Image (cartoon, helix red, strand yellow):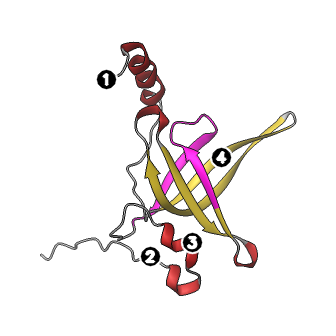
Amino acid sequence: MKNRYIADFEKAQIGSKEIPQFKAGDTLRLGIHIKEGDKSRVQYFEGICIAVRGEGAGKTFVTRKIAANGVGVERIFPLYSDSLESIKLLRVGRVRRAKLYYLRNRSGKAARIKEVRKKVAVA
């Protein structure tokens, strides 16, 4: 059971952000607010969400992408962080696991995730 003051604080943190519904296996484009000296800019990080964990204001997710020379890059983002400016859902993946850590050992075509096919209504 949470303290009501903590619950009120978390509700205030969560209520101000628009976040799409996503899960492990989905491809995301994240706009990250970066401050360099007195300048500020948004840098995009596009990759596959391999894990979502936690609840409330402490919820985090891990995103993985393959960078230059085939090097894998993973970043952990707090879902309600101020530095996370935008989250855009690009593809919905079809997976059977909640945590996709096995992608760390795969490369090339073996690391692909199938996309969910949308049902088309036949008229």
Secondary structure of residue under mark 1: loop
**Residue 64: horizontal and vertical position, in percent?**
58, 63
- Find disc 4 in the rendering and name its residue: 32
Amino acid under label 1?
Met
Magenta span has 79? yes
Callout 4 environment at 10 Å: few (<14), some (14 to 19), or many (20+)? some
Q: From the image, give the main secondary structure of the stretch colored magenta.
A: strand
Secondary structure of residue under mark 4: strand
Residue at the image point whose x is 52% and y is 79% from the top: 111
The answer to whether marks 4 and 1 mark residues whose Cβ atoms lie closer than 8 Å is no
The first of marks 2 and 1 along the sequence is 1
Q: Furthest-right residue in view? A: 37
Q: What distance separates the C-alpha of mark 4 from that of mark 1?
A: 33 Å
Q: What distance separates the C-alpha of mark 2 from that of mark 3?
A: 13 Å
Amino acid under label 2?
Ile
* 78 shown above or below 111: above
Q: What distance separates the C-alpha of mark 2 from that of mark 1?
A: 38 Å
- Residue 112 bears which disc, if any? none
Residue at the image point whose x is 48% and y is 26% from the top: 13
Q: What distance separates the C-alpha of mark 2 from that of mark 4?
A: 24 Å
- Find disc 1 in the rendering and name its residue: 1
The first of marks 1 and 3 along the sequence is 1
Q: Nearer the viewer, residue 116 or 11?
A: 11
Q: What distance separates the C-alpha of mark 4 from that of mark 3?
A: 23 Å
The first of marks 2 and 4 along the sequence is 4
- Find disc 3 in the rendering and name its residue: 104
Secondary structure of residue under mark 2: loop
Q: Nearer the viewer, mark 2 or mark 3?
A: 3
Residue numbers of the magenta segment: 74-92
The first of marks 2 and 3 along the sequence is 3
The first of marks 4 and 1 along the sequence is 1
